[in-house]
Image: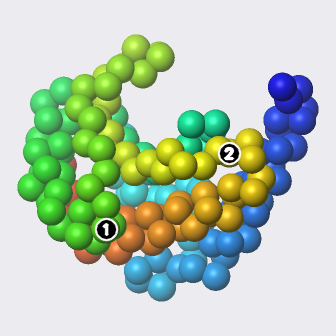
């Protein structure tokens, strides 16, 4: 088991390596970007990367406090589901009405690779490749349809 300090250093090493891996990649519109803090440009939507001993995860979270707005946004995403799946090359997991530990309800589209373990450094290149492929594919989809999603909320 890693101590708190060892875990912090381990996380720093992993994510610095991933930043280095992604440094040469721009968005679909040729913009430089911090891939770890992907700008969705829509409040209450987040693209999150997560790794642990169960796998590597890319999550697109929809966290509108107003359930009606969240439902409308999710419905639009569902209409774009086939396009998104074609862009990412993966169906992903479409999870409705998830409850966070903090108690709020959210929806999530999740792409997972369960064949890797974050705590096994030999798996890091595979994790990097998985996250890189999904991020770039998601960006390709998102840059094309972001305006549709933004206009939905106006």
Q: Nearer the viewer, residue 22 or 133?
A: 133
Q: Secondary structure at mark 1?
A: loop
Is 77 on the left-hand or right-hand side of 100?
Answer: left
- Rendered image quadrant of residue 99: top left
Residue 48 horizontal side relative to residue 122, left or right = left
- The tag earlier along the polypeptide, 1 or 2, is 1
For the point 31% across and 30% down, the residue is 106
| Image quarter of residue 64 | top left
In terms of depth relative to the viewer, which is nearer, 17 or 76?
A: 17
Number of numbered discs on residues: 2
Residue shown at 74% from the left, 47% from the top = 120
Estimate the x, y position of residue 136 in percent, counting from the top left.
45, 71
Residue 97 appears at what percent x and percent y? 25, 26
Q: Could you tell me if the residues under marks 1 and 2 are in contact, i.e. CB atoms within 8 Å?
A: no
Task: Spot the residue most to the bottom.
Answer: 30
Element class at badge 2: loop
**Whether residue 78 is situated above or below residue 131 in the rendered picture:** above
Residue where numbered disc 2 is placed: 118
3D distance between C-alphas at marks 1 and 2: 23 Å
Image coordinates of residue 63 in percent, x first then y, are 33, 34
- Mark 1 surroundings: few (<14), some (14-19) or many (≥20) residues within 10 A: few
Q: Which mark is residue 2?
A: none
Horizontally, residue 70 falls left or right of residue 72, namely: right
How far across and down, in percent of the image, does residue 72 sit?
Answer: 11, 41
Q: Is residue 81 left or right of residue 122?
A: left
Please give the residue where the numbered disc 1 appears in the rendered image: 89
**Residue at point 15%, 62% (across, down):** 82
């Amino acid at each position: 088991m890693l101590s708190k300090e060892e875990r912090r250093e381990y996380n720093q090493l992993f994510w610095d390596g991933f930043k280095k891996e992604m440094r040469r990649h721009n968005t679909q519109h040729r913009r430089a970007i911090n891939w770890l803090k992907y700008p969705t440009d829509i409040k209450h939507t987040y693209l999150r990367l997560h790794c642990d001993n169960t796998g590597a995860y890319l999550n697109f979270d929809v966290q509108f406090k107003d359930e009606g707005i969240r439902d409308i946004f999710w419905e639009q995403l569902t209409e774009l589901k086939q396009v998104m799946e074609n862009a990412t090359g993966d169906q992903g997991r479409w999870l409705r009405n998830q409850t966070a530990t903090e108690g709020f309800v959210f929806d999530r589209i999740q792409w997972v690779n369960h064949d890797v373990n974050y705590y096994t450094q030999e798996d890091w290149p595979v994790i990097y490749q998985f996250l890189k492929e999904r991020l770039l594919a998601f960006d390709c989809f998102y840059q094309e349809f972001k305006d549709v999603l933004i206009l939905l909320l106006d």
